[in-house]
Amino acid sequence: MSPTPRTEPHDLHAEQAVLGAALLAPVVIADLASRLAAADFHRPAHGTLWEALLDMHATGHPTDLVAVTAHLNDTGVLGRVGGAPYLHTLMQACPTPANAGHYAGIVAEHARRRAVAVLGTRLTQLAGSGTDTADVLAASRALLATTSTTTGGGHWPAPVPLGDRRHLPAFPVAVLPGWLADMIAAVAEFTQTPPDLPGSLALACLSTAAGGRAVVEVRGTWTEPVNLYIVVVLPPGSRKSAVFAAMTAPLLAAERTLVDQARPIIVEADLAARVAGKTAERAANAAANTTDPAARDRLLADAAAAAVHAETVTVPALPRLVADDITSEKAASLLAEQDGRLAVLSAEGGIFATLAGRYSGTPNLEVFLKGHAGDMLRVDRQGRGGEHVDHPALTLGLAVQPEVLRDIAGMPGFRGKGLLARILFAVPENTVGRRRIGPPAIPTDIAEAYTGDLTSLVLTLAEWTDPAVLPLTPEANQRVLAIETAVEPRLTAAGAWGHIVDWGAKYTGAVVRLAGLIHLATHLRDGWGRPIRATTVDAAAALGDYYAAHALAAFHDMGADPTTEHARTVLAWIERTHATAFTKRDLYRAFRSQIPKAADLDPILDLLDTHGWIRRLDSPERASAGRPPSPTYLAHPDLTRTAGTLHTLAEPPRRTA
């Protein structure tokens, strides 16, 4: 009898769950890109689909079901993967995207087992071929390094560069309401700028319209105002001013309308105040000039009543929505005048130098800290009355140059007091040098729809003296809970956001604020009378994912991530020494002067592992008690391709006489 063919190790259901999770929640692709290659899937169709997903993710294309189906159809492989119906089957096969990492581990483990089987076969063939024993051992080391821990028959996927902006996600325009998304796309096309700039400014404009006029009620006493701080980082010559003009024009038009509406009221109030003041003055003079003691008491009472009445007559300030470069003191005054609402929108970053004390010599961040949180603001000044704002709502929308981003990291108090933690950063790819000449102008109907809808939102919400409360549906609340659950582990010291824990701790609140703005922009006429739905939170979460990735890049540019800097140094060491394999102990010996404890290497090695630059070998079973062996890692072949021979580095090379 011939032996029964042995089935190669695989788990079809786990492969389907991984692909289904990627289609349901495209954000998991970034987490799994360095862990799974196309060849790790046992079913070829699954490998083809995974390769397509990786390619789309790497180039910044959306990876939702519709986009993936269109891409597969355009590349002629849709039928090869089972057609559009099979993509729906994959999505149904995924219990929850939250467990994508677990299923990916199963797929990777089976791929390793298949690789081990291939290794055994090849070693058996070598041993039976009459090859010298020493050559067989040398070959086995090479096979172990390139096959046993490299899934998919020896294929290493391209590593993800550390801090490389080319791999940052594109602005998810499609999650915004049509009137807003159309304008963003049209402005980006006409100005030949990345959609990140008009997209982020669109959110700042929504924040200007709704800030101080609405809050999101999450649960219990937890509420979030809907004002945002947004900073877009682009070099000079990026047409920032042109984009600002296009996106903010409706705000300035709405401001003029509010001024026109308020001017008669202001004139009437000013006249009433002057009449009341004159009346009080005449009453006081009459009381002072009388010689009749009995009449003096009556006249004094009349004068006091007239003075009190004069004090109650207030003259409203001219409405103001937008400021440019402004001091903290002036911002506090305007917030007090404008019922707690103000936006600072600028195509330059001069406001940061002002806050750092360019004029006063002393940093003054309190207004901008409280203006984001909505905390009560009281400002007492010598020589004039104090200013009081119960719930200030300040909006910040800036486009700054990369040099400004690097400068603000060193400005006193910006990081320590939490200003940087409140900012949503966008670090888009620069399009200068690749712009299309003569693009079409912004279509009139799109510009008119944007202007009309944004103006309507401003004017409608301007009438609210108390902020509208926007509750969440139970399903939306569950979405927020899921975000909190996913974020919390990232905030540990060894977590992905451990070096920006101040920013990460405010992440869920930022997503909630984004959800409130999307809700109001979707329901322009009656958003305050509807609860926020789960789909709106999902859209806000997509924006949150975008800003989280860009925040990591921004803080890296500000030098806030020592782990990444150490990881770059380790990569340089691997290239210099041609270390195709090394242990954690080897690395510690090489960097003991820079890294005091071996445990401090763990986040560095984890970062390099998740980016695909190194791979950890499974530790062998211990045959006896004692200190466990130091973990061993393989280096990506691209780092050591010039090494010529394969070797494990026990220590840095020594010079010989």
Image: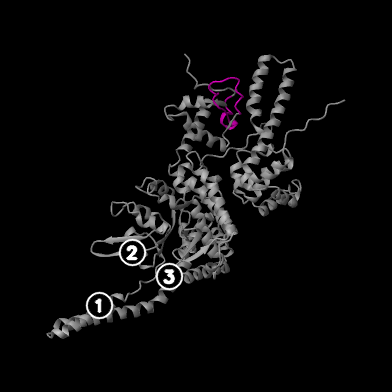
**Tags 1 and 2 touching, CB below 8 Å:** no
Label 1, on which residue? 307
Residues 297 and 574: in front is 297
Quarter of the figure with residue 102: top right
| Three-letter amino acid code at the position of disc 1 | Ala
Residue in view at x 31 percent, y 53 percent: 358
- Is residue 173 visible in the rendered image? The answer is no
Secondary-structure class at tag 2: strand
Question: Residue 388 has which mark?
Answer: 2
Residues 467 and 463: in front is 467
Mark found first going from the N terminus, 2 or 3: 2
- Is residue 370 visible in the rendered image? The answer is yes
Q: Which residues are magenta?
A: 618-643
Quarter of the figure with residue 609: top right
| Three-letter amino acid code at the position of disc 3 | Thr
| Relative horizontal placement of residue 112, taking residue 345 as reference (left or right) | right
Secondary-structure class at tag 1: helix
Residue in view at x 64 percent, y 19 percent: 138
Secondary-structure class at tag 3: loop
| Relative horizontal placement of residue 60, taking residue 657 as reference (left or right) | right
- Residue 395 percent across, percent down from the top left: 43, 60
| Three-letter amino acid code at the position of disc 2 | His
**Tags 1 and 3 touching, CB below 8 Å:** no
- Residue 305 percent across, percent down from the top left: 25, 79
- Residue 413 percent across, percent down from the top left: 35, 48
Overall secondary structure of the magenta section: loop
Residue in view at x 56 percent, y 20 percent: 625
| Relative horizontal placement of residue 130, taking residue 174 as reference (left or right) | right
Q: CA distance from mark 2 to mark 3?
A: 16 Å
- Residue 95 percent across, percent down from the top left: 67, 48
Residue in view at x 27 percent, y 76 percent: 308
